[in-house]
Image (cartoon, rainbow, N blue to C red):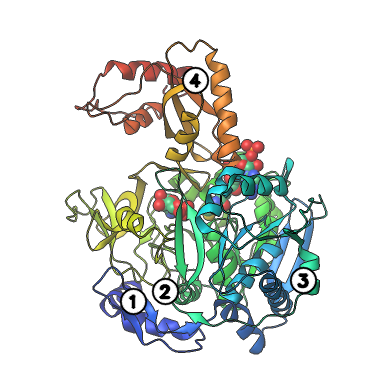
């Protein structure tokens, strides 16, 4: 029995003992009554009765125990060519003061605060200040359009929004304030206050009475101490794409989250306190929450906040520069970033310009990692490259080769075995385990380990129907794949209409809702077609209303602009075709899977239930005209 297998088994046989021990890594104001409360029900809770403050665990305790002078954040901005190092002492001072500013502007424990910010240290300060107050933050990714922000404002009903004057993309400046103002205009709920951080690149106009300047808010505020909250009180909401246009508000608690993330730093990522850890993601995504902010800081690491891209800021050596310059020990990014680097520097020539001797491991997640990319990274870097699998819902890995426990052999195409705490199964439609190696719906036996979602924000019924209903006693991941004879998990595709574009999770339903709003469109469908760089790209099919005779190219261009305007540039919706009909089953279900097979030039069987197979020929011809389906 390997060390990993021993630990994994122990975690499932005696979760109380396993997570009770892990919880000793966290400072509690009041210890929990029970490690796992109500284990037989799907309303189980971790560390019930325990009380703590997550910000205290991420900052104060490190300063109290002598880590104050250590760098907490290395801010490396390739797009502004600036760097800043912030020590734990400095970060604590800023966070305490900003918590005071939030409180002075009416934010109380339990209130929601939306954070719509670029990759700057103030975004982390805002997040931790909310945690300090026991206010519930909800970070919204900067690449979403105003309408998406408005949806989140209406769902979370924030007391206050924290934003900045602009984000900086390699080729353009994104003024956040007009987007924020438009979102508040669209939303029914109006936040009482907005706090704006003015970046030197552009100054936003403030609305008197509602908007407050960050610097002024800090100057007039008093430091605020940590508010102790219950282990099961919410720490944050993070909206993620479901199958409809209405995003799901994933709720994360304080206690289980702190325990799991702290535990994961050593056991999964193999880093010790004091070492530099870098997740090259965005704070708007779950990876950013867990591994730019909370995980490294809870564990006393130095975290890198990189504002830039793997390519173009200024070149495909950006990641190597950052890793070398800051002596990064473990790095985490999405495979798409490596595909982008590989495309521009196929030989990895730029790697030799840098001293990467500190870098021990590269972790990849966010989308399926193709074996080519994995092997390229292994070959060029000469270190273990670990693909691991998780979701916004889970907050940390469901499956991983846990480097701090045991470096198991890597299998390209697999995300590794189930992480401790996870009981992962591939099920058939009846809920029975399929044979090893056979594809099924991947589901995890309840109770899930600490740190995963405790529900959907004010949507209990949706939570149950989305995750718990199909396979009673299990959490349905929405991913399909198989578990091989060695217990390694292979995640192949989604079972729903969620797609993954450059490691960003998007709902085809949300894009379809926008397309359906075009006045000439009678019916539409969106699929995720394979893309060499971004993994998938959305592709639209438009059926026009009878009598519409405007040029198809014009209509397509209008829909492209609408999606950019209403969902955001991050959707990368650039291509659509006009067809006379959509392929459907006799009961009217659109055959998106078949359309995807055609677009990706894959073999497919004509479904027996299809209403009219001839329509597939038209789809194929239309796709060939725009470069798909060879
Ligand atoms: N604010 C505003 N706009 C943003 C944005 C942000 N925070 N992030 C991305 N965008 C815009 C981009 O500028 C681009 O706009 P364009 O259509 O005008 O070019 C569009 O959204 C699409 O962005 P993206 O898909 O990221 O493409 P890209 O060409 O800018 O970069 C990669 C491609 C592969 C380099 C990039 O996607 C990447 O690094 N991905 C890693 C993903 C990741 O970290 N995922 C998190 C899970 S680990
Ligand atoms: P998100 O919630 O944005 O993190 O997206 C989660 C989804 O991304 C998962 O349900 C998977 O479909 C996909 N995903 C994440 N990591 C991996 C991985 N390592 N391999 C395959 N798919 C992944």
Q: Is residue 535 left or right of residue 174?
A: left
Q: Secondary structure at mark 1?
A: helix
**On the rendered image, what quadrant is the C terminus found in?**
top left
For label 4, the crowd category at 10 Å Cα-Cα, with few meaning under 14, some 14 to 19 and many 20 or more, is some
**Mark 1 lies within 8 Å of ligand 2 (Cβ measured):** no
Query: Which residue lies under the disc numbered 3?
Result: 218
Q: Which percent across, then down, holds residue 385?
A: 49, 58
Circles 2 and 1: CB distance less than 8 Å?
yes
- Image point (30%, 76%), residue name: 6
- The CA span between labels 4 and 1 is 59 Å
Mark 1, Cα crowd under 10 Å, few <14 / some 14-19 / many 20+, is: some
Closer to viewer: mark 3 or mark 2: 3
Q: Identify the residue under disc 4.
A: 520
User: For mark 1, what is the residue?
Assistant: 7
The image's mark for residue 392 is none
State the CA–CA distance, disc 2 to disc 1.
Answer: 8 Å
Residue corresponding to mark 2:
405
Label 2 environment density (alpha carbons within 10 Å; few <14, some 14–19, many ≥20):
some
Could you tell me residue 55's position as x and y percent? Answer: 59, 77
Question: What element does badge 3 sit on?
Answer: helix
616 to the left or right of 150: left
């Amino acid at each position: 029995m390997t060390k990993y297998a021993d630990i994994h088994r122990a975690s499932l046989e005696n979760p109380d003992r396993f997570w009770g021990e892990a919880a000793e890594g966290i400072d509690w104001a009041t210890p929990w009554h029970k490690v796992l409360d109500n284990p037989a029900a799907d309303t189980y809770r971790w560390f019930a009765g325990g009380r703590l403050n997550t910000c205290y665990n991420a900052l104060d305790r490190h300063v109290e125990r002598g880590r104050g002078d250590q760098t907490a954040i290395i801010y490396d901005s390739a797009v502004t060519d600036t760097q800043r190092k912030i020590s734990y002492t400095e970060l604590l001072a800023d966070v305490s003061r900003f918590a005071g500013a939030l409180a002075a502007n009416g934010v109380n424990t339990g209130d929601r605060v939306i954070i719509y910010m670029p990759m700057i240290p103030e975004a982390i300060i805002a997040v931790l200040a909310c945690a300090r107050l026991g206010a519930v933050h909800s970070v919204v990714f900067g690449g979403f359009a105003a309408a998406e922000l408005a949806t989140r404002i209406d769902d979370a009903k924030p007391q206050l929004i924290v934003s900045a004057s602009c984000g900086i993309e390699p080729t353009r400046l994104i003024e956040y304030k007009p987007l924020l103002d438009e979102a508040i205009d669209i939303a029914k709920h109006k936040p009482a206050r907005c706090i704006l951080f003015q970046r030197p690149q552009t100054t936003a106009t403030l609305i008197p009475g509602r908007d407050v300047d960050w610097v002024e808010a800090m100057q007039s505020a008093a430091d605020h101490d940590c508010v102790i909250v219950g282990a099961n009180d919410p720490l944050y909401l993070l909206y993620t794409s479901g199958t409809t246009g209405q995003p799901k508000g994933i709720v994360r608690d304080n206690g289980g989250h702190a325990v799991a993330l702290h535990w994961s730093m050593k056991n999964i990522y193999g880093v010790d306190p004091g070492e530099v850890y870098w997740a090259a993601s965005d704070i708007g995504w779950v990876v950013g929450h867990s591994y730019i902010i909370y995980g490294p800081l809870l564990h006393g690491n130095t975290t890198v906040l990189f504002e830039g891209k793997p390519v173009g800021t200024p070149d495909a050596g950006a990641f190597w520069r950052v890793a070398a310059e800051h002596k990064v020990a473990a790095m985490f990014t999405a495979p798409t970033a490596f595909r982008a680097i590989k495309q521009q520097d196929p030989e990895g020539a730029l790697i030799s310009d840098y001293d990467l001797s500190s870098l021990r491991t590269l972790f990849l997640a966010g989308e399926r990692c193709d074996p080519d990319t994995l092997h390229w990274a292994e070959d060029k870097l000469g270190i273990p490259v670990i693909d691991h699998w998780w979701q916004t819902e889970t907050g940390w890995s469901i499956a991983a080769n846990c480097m701090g426990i045991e470096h198991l052999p890597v299998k390209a195409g697999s995300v590794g075995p189930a992480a401790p705490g996870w009981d992962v199964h591939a099920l058939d439609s009846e809920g029975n385990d399929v044979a090893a190696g056979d594809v099924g719906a991947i589901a995890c036996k309840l109770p899930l380990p600490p740190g995963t979602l405790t529900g959907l924000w004010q949507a209990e019924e949706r939570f149950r129907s989305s995750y718990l209903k199909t396979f009673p006693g299990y959490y349905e991941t929405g991913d399909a794949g198989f578990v091989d004879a060695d217990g390694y998990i292979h995640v192949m595709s989604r079972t729903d209409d969620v797609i993954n574009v450059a490691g960003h999770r998007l709902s085809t339903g949300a894009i379809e809702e926008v397309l359906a709003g075009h006045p000439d469109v009678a019916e539409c469908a969106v699929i995720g077609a394979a893309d060499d760089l971004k993994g998938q790209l959305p592709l639209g099919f438009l059926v026009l209303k009878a009598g519409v005779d405007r040029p198809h190219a014009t209509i397509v261009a209008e829909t492209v602009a609408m999606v950019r305007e209403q969902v955001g540039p991050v959707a990368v919706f650039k291509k659509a075709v006009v067809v006379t009909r959509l392929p459907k089953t006799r009961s009217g279900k659109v055959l998106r899977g078949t359309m995807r097979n055609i677009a990706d030039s894959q073999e497919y069987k004509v479904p027996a239930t299809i209403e009219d197979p001839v329509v597939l020929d038209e789809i194929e011809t239309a796709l060939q005209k725009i470069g798909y389906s060879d």
